[in-house]
């Protein structure tokens, strides 16, 4: 019997997806700072992921404003591309498509989560800085009405360029504490105008962006939204609010809703809690697919959504993925970190060679017990998480350079090496 993971999926816009697996968006951080274009490394990376067995490949976040990067090595589309730039984007799309996968571009603006060495005074809904230790993020400036209009135009332009470059779809990133997610979050958005306050106002920017993106690409082109189930923070965007936003999104033409959760302060997307205690969000715990962090939220959202729903976060075993589909909790399964460990992991799973996918990064730790990822000390927990992420970034770099990700490095040295690389990229950016 064929696996439900291998069934095609017809989207509301009419496009058909080859199967139910999607490579989740993972920032590549390999573009030349200042240039921000995809290059041969991106092509190598997406050629490798093109053989992943995932029917859809979401790119890492492509940024609509070079002043608001998630990282200095991001791809940026913040103007009409010239011939050279369009050719680079086309080559990127083609690389991912070479074995039949669909290439979708994720579009974002980092807002207050822009690193300080990129922009010390980034735009955000309000002048509320991130509540994180260290000095990595600046104090944001509250956006004016003109700034907001520019963001809406920026998302729409980027989507239009993605389509012109041959991408098969786009995704609006409204999760993980980036700009659109900041607008939804009452802790980050304390505006008193029509863009802040009640949920209807906080959701206005996301809805305006989705509307503009749809208008830019036409009715028959896949448009997806990535949304938090919740921020899991006291006073943050709640699951109840998420359900309401999904109802509003259902009135627009959205083809796939991806459910995730958390932000830099509360990195639930990585399956961990931040320095503050995670706010509990009531949800019926239905499933055996418990390894997946947000699948029960996705299931409840699916009840109010009129578009297919994708659950991303923590999926590792084929059984859990199939159960999520069979139990009607999700229509698609997103997989992230395991594709850094083995770019062909899901294909091997579909072929019956393995029972699931593996995330090597998750096995790394600062030390045993108290020094590990489950440490009671918040800082230690965070360093473990950042070190694990550093391994993923190094693995992406390795694959983009045609190397096999090395498995042997200690977590702390990985963390330091990644920090050094980010610093060098930021220095190159500021010099250029
Ligand atoms: C290296 C790395 C980079 C990521 N970059 C992005 C990104 O650019 N955009 C995004 O929406 N999520 C990003 N994520 C989050 C993933 O899309 C996904 O939501 C998360 O990793 C949980 O899925 P997983 O448990 O299968 O890894 C990233 C995750 C990793 C591991």
Image: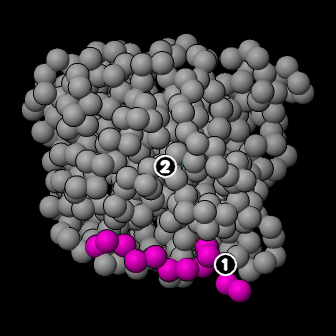
- Residue position marked by numbered label 2 in the rendering: 300
Residue shown at 54% from the left, 71% from the top: 20
Residue 73 or residue 14, whichever sits in front = 14
Q: In this view of the protein, which residue sits in the foreground, 399 or 280?
A: 280
Label 1 vs label 2, nearer the camera: 2
Decide if residue 54 is on the left or right side of residue 412. left
Q: Position of residue 315 (x, y in %)?
A: 67, 54
Give the structural element (helix, strand or loop) at label 1: loop
Tell me if the residue at label 1 has its CB under 8 Å from ligand 1: no
Q: Secondary structure at mark 2?
A: helix
Which residue range is magenta in the image?
Answer: 1-13
Direction from residue 119 to residue 348 in the image, left or right: right
Q: Magenta stretch: residue 81 in it?
A: no
- The residue carrying mark 1 is 3
Say which quarter of the image contains residue 204: top left
Q: CA distance from mark 1 to mark 2?
A: 23 Å
> 264 above or below 211?
above
The local crowd at label 1, few if under 14, some if 14 to 19, many if 20 or more residues have their Cα within 10 Å, is: few
Q: Would you say 52 lies left or right of 22 here?
A: right
The image quadrant of residue 127 is top left
Image point (38%, 43%), residue name: 243
Q: Main secondary structure of the magenta part?
A: loop
| Residue 195 drawn at (x, y percent) | 18, 29
Q: Which mark is residue 239?
A: none
- Where does the image place residue 93, in percent across and percent down from the top left? 41, 71
Q: Quadrant of residue 203?
A: top left
């Amino acid at each position: 019997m064929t696996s439900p993971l291998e069934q095609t999926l017809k989207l509301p816009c009419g496009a058909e997806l080859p199967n139910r697996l999607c490579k989740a968006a993972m920032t590549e951080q390999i573009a030349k700072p200042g240039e921000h274009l995809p290059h041969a490394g991106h092509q190598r990376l997406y050629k490798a992921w093109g053989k992943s067995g995932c029917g859809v490949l979401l790119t890492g976040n492509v940024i609509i404003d070079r002043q608001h990067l998630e990282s200095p090595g991001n791809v940026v589309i913040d103007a009409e591309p010239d011939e050279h730039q369009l050719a680079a984007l086309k080559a990127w799309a083609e690389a991912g498509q070479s074995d039949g996968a669909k290439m979708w571009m994720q579009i974002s603006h980092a807002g207050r989560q822009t690193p300080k060495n990129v922009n010390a005074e980034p735009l955000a809904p309000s002048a509320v800085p991130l509540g994180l230790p260290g000095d990595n993020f600046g104090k944001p400036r509250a956006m004016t009405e003109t700034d907001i209009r520019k963001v809406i135009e920026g998302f729409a332009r980027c989507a239009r360029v993605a389509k012109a470059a041959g991408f098969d779809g786009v995704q609006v990133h409204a999760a993980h504490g980036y700009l659109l997610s900041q607008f939804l979050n009452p802790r980050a958005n304390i505006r008193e105008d029509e863009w802040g306050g009640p949920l209807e106002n906080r959701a206005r920017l996301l809805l305006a962006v989705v509307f503009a993106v749809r208008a830019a690409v036409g009715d028959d082109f896949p448009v997806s939204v990535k949304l938090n189930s919740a921020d899991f923070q006291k006073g943050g965007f709640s699951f109840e609010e998420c359900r309401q936003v999904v109802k509003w999104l259902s009135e627009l033409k959205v083809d796939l809703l991806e459910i995730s959760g958390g932000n830099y302060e509360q990195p639930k997307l990585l399956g961990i809690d931040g320095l503050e205690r995670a706010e509990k969000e009531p949800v019926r715990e239905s499933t055996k697919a418990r390894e997946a962090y947000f699948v029960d939220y996705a299931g409840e959202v699916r009840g109010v959504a009129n578009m297919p729903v994708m659950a991303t976060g923590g999926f590792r075993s084929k059984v859990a993925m199939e159960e999520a589909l069979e139990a009607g909790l999700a229509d698609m399964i997103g997989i992230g970190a395991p594709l850094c460990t083995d770019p062909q992991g899901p294909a091997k799973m579909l072929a019956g060679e393995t029972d699931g996918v593996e995330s090597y990064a998750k096995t790394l730790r600062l030390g045993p017990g108290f020094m590990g990822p489950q440490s009671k000390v918040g800082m230690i927990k965070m360093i473990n998480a950042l070190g694990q992420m550093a391994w993923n970034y190094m693995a992406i770099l390795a694959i983009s350079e045609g190397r096999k990700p090395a498995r042997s490095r200690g977590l702390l040295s990985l963390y330091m090496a990644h920090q050094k690389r980010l610093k060098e990229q930021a220095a190159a950016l500021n010099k250029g």
